Image (cartoon, grey):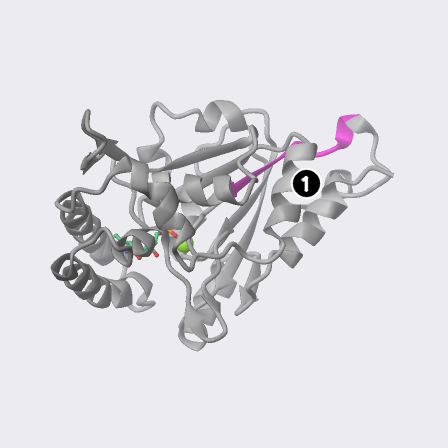
């Protein structure tokens, strides 16, 4: 939590102003979970549902989702139990996707034709952070190429935005051959997969971190940031709200239930960043 008078407020001397950084999950955190009673797609789902996947491929990817997603969000299973199963899910899904001859040149169109939506208020969030030179790290177990295209099409892929995610590798003809490592799944979002990235360097002077996530796996995304003194963890509780509320309230500082907006995050940032 942000603690102590010195960190938050409008009457601070510049020296005492916090140096915030934002670390955010992407799927179901920056993107919407649902709209008008229908689920919105994750970055993987955008590919799965697209016209470039064969009917057989679609069915197999659906089967994986129906088998592994309940495990991912099960509050009664331990991390130790879930981790190997998540590696299994991601590996099998990436293997199937890599058999589909997906073309790099089709990605923009695939995203345009999808039902993905960013949460209401995304533009204010990205604009505020950019204007105030606050780094935004998107740490995602989704598909980096897809989520980058989403924020590019939304015209908010500013210079302060960095993405760590699973990226596709294409051959000389622009056809997907495999996903580059290390594999990032829901429950290894920590410094074990951040070697060689600009993550720590970019966040090295940041003493206050705002962490945004929707999964219990997102809670470790700020582990290892060197100068961090305060972390405000904001959790979107999207699914299985009743069963998971207690655990989310224990782990996150703020829990937003069935909220498809970024209003709370924007309000906090406005308060932190506005000089009067
Ligand atoms: P993240 O939001 O923590 O970055 O995780 C990505 C989400 O992607 C996670 O909730 C599970 C989901 N997912 C799919 O929808 N389809 C897939 O094939 C895989 C591997 C993951
Ligand atoms: Mg997520």
Q: Is residue 16 magenta?
A: yes
Say above or below: 65 vs 24: below
What is the x, y in percent for residue 202? 52, 25
Dot 1, crowdedness within 10 Å: few (<14), some or many (≥20)? some
With 47 as the anchor, is 243 left or right in this view? right
Say above or below: 145 vs 110: above
What is the x, y in percent for residue 23? 51, 41
- The C terminus - image quarter: top right
Badge 1 marks a residue whose secondary structure is helix
Q: Quadrant of ligand 2?
A: bottom left
Q: Residue at x 62, y 47 (%)?
A: 123
- 7 or 92: nearer the viewer: 92
What is the x, y in percent for residue 239? 42, 70
Q: Residue at x 31, y 49 (%)?
A: 187
According to the image, label 1 marks what residue?
Answer: 128
With 237 as the anchor, is 14 left or right in this view? right
Is residue 167 at least partly visible in the picture?
no
Say above or below: 37 vs 64: below
The quadrant in which residue 207 appears is: top right
Q: Is residue 73 magenta?
A: no
Q: Residue at x 65, y 40 (%)?
A: 127
What is the x, y in percent for residue 203? 53, 28
- 155 or 261: nearer the viewer: 155
Q: Residue at x 19, y 59 (%)?
A: 61
- 163 or 185: nearer the viewer: 163
Q: Which residues are magenta?
A: 15-23
Say above or below: 66 vs 179: below
């Amino acid at each position: 939590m942000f603690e102590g008078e010195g960190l938050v407020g409008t009457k601070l001397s510049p020296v005492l102003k916090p140096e915030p950084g934002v670390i955010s999950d992407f799927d179901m955190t920056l993107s919407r979970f649902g709209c008008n009673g229908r689920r919105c797609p994750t970055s993987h789902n955008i590919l799965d549902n697209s016209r470039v996947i064969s009917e057989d491929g679609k069915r197999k990817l659906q089967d994986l989702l129906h088998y592994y997603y309940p495990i991912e969000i099960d509050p009664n299973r331990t991390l130790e139990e879930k981790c190997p199963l998540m590696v299994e899910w991601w590996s099998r899904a990436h293997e199937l996707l890599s058999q589909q001859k997906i073309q790099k040149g089709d990605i923009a169109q695939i995203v345009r034709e999808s039902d993905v939506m960013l949460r209401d208020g995304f533009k204010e969030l990205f604009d505020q952070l950019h204007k105030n030179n606050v780094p935004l790290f998107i740490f995602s177990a989704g598909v980096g190429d897809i989520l980058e295209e989403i924020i590019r099409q939304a015209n908010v892929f500013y210079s302060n935005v960095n993405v760590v995610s699973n990226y596709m590798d294409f051959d000389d003809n622009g056809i997907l051959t495999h996903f580059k490592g290390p594999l990032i799944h829901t429950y290894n979002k920590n410094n074990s997969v951040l070697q060689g990235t600009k993550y720590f360097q970019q966040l090295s002077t940041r003493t206050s971190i705002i962490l945004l996530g929707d999964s219990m796996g997102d809670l470790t995304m700020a582990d290892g940031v060197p100068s961090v003194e305060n972390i405000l963890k904001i959790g979107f509780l999207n699914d299985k709200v009743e069963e998971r509320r207690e655990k989310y309230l224990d782990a996150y500082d703020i829990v937003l239930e069935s909220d498809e907006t970024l209003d709370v995050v924007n309000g906090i940032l406005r308060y932190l960043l506005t000089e009067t």
